[in-house]
Amino acid sequence: MLDAVVVGAGPNGLTAAVELARRGFSVAVFEARGTVGGGARTEELTLPGFRHDPCSAAHPLGVNSPAFRALPLERHGLEWLQPELPMAHPFPDGTAAVLARSVTETAASFGPRDAGAYRRLVEPFLPRWDTLVRDFMSLPLTALPRDPVTLARFGLAGLPPSTWLMRRFRDERAKALFAGLVAHVMAPLNGFATGAVGLVFALAAHARGWPLARGGSQAISDALAGYLKELGGAVHTDYEVKRLDDLPPARAYVFDTSPTALARIAGLGRYYDGFRYGPGVFKIDYALDGPVPWTAEEPRTAGTVQIGADSAEIGAALNAASREGRAPERPFLITVQPSVVDPTRAPAGKHVFWAYGHVPNGWTGDLTDAVERQLERYAPGFRDRILARATAGPPELAARNANYVGGDIATGSVAGLRILLRPRPTLFPYHTPHPAVFICSSATPPGPGVHGMSGHNAAKAVWRRLRQT
């Protein structure tokens, strides 16, 4: 009998398996797809030689993850590549604000009226960043805080809505960039703890950047799987699990799945009926005949580029998708241009690029024209560079990854208290009513992103259980 079986080979499932194997437990992972990866895959979606990331591409939380940093992933092929700028946010007038590694450079891009306010916001936390991120990503408490004072200060700044925090800024440049940071988790700007979201992304950039993995996000998943095999764990692909009886006998079963899929497979009845999914996304992967022709200079060297004219436009786009049930006319876009820093991703002189905008959960329309009209506002001639595109709305995203119910790449709404209390309001989010069944997906704290911390935290709950039996 195995000690633990993990269902789902995304970053969280693989991290949970690694953490258990490191502690001497026998572990096997079962994945429905033909390769490991979940939200961290790399595929040729458009043309031969163009290597795209179907979901996550830039990894500010990955490079800062306490879980990943404790593992020898570089030995198994993971190499982080740092673009010259972590992120840029262009404006219609041809200028741009930036999120740079340097706090001073970032503050200067906001202009003199907000430079000081930004420095006062982030600089107190940077000296204690490693301790703060460990404490923040271990909530609810899987370990006692190492620095409760700094964590409390962070909570005072971050728990109110981001719209409150943005009152510190006087000009739109800083407000728009910060609103865009919050929008990465698809939460309305006036939601609970959304200030913390923006702060975490900003601090992560100043601490270790927003890197990409050489060769694509698949390298992260492959490194985790390689280390797991080195530890004696097994990985089985093309193995769809429909019920617990499909799995070999084990002392614990750990699910890197959506809560609703877990309830169906494990026979948990209506346990997760209160769980809610958030907005979906409409994503386009592009093969380009050259770099994106940004009007502003700064986006040309940035790994990630946010597209939203101002905080009002960004807020309206989020509200349309999450509250009004319609696709925004001017979607807020998150875009990533991997080949700016990694030429192996495309043939010589060519580029890969992706963009996504928020849409209602389960939306079946086509946002391509709206996305490209937005891009043309900041990069005139963009359409002329397109060699091929691969579009994926909510139905296609859900078909590729069963965790993305209705196209929700966050695996659950982060609106209101759900940003912290997920998948249920409990201090034991990784447990289920079945004493041998656990959940480790991004539906659990600390939530979405390729960082493995949900798997890391869940593994703690599992090994404590195994040591009691």
Image (cartoon, grey):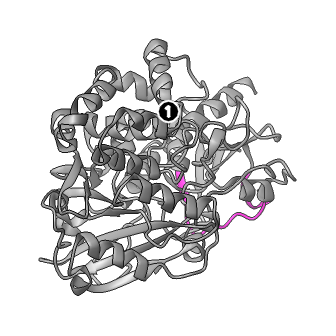
- x and y percent of residue 103 in the render? 21, 34
| Residue 49 visible | no
Residue interval drawn in magenta: 234-248
Residue 296 lies, with reference to residue 262, above or below; the image says below
Magenta segment includes 239: yes
Quarter of the N terminus within the rendering = top right
Q: Outermost residue toward the right?
A: 269
| Residue drawn at 60 percent across, 67 percent down | 360
| Residue 440 visible | yes
Q: Main secondary structure of the magenta part?
A: loop
> In this orientation, which residue lies closer to the viewer: 244 or 265?
265
- x and y percent of residue 202 in the render? 33, 39
> In this orientation, which residue lies closer to the viewer: 25 or 225?
225
Which residue was labeled with disc 1?
137
Magenta segment includes 439: no
- Provide the secondary structure element on which disc 1 rests: loop
Q: Residues within 10 Å of mark 1 (few under 14, many from 20)?
A: many
| Residue drawn at 66 percent across, 34 percent down | 462
- x and y percent of residue 173 in the render? 28, 48
| Residue drawn at 56 percent across, 81 percent down | 365
Kind of residue indicated by mark 1: Met
- x and y percent of residue 324 in the render? 63, 64
Quarter of the C terminus within the rendering = top right
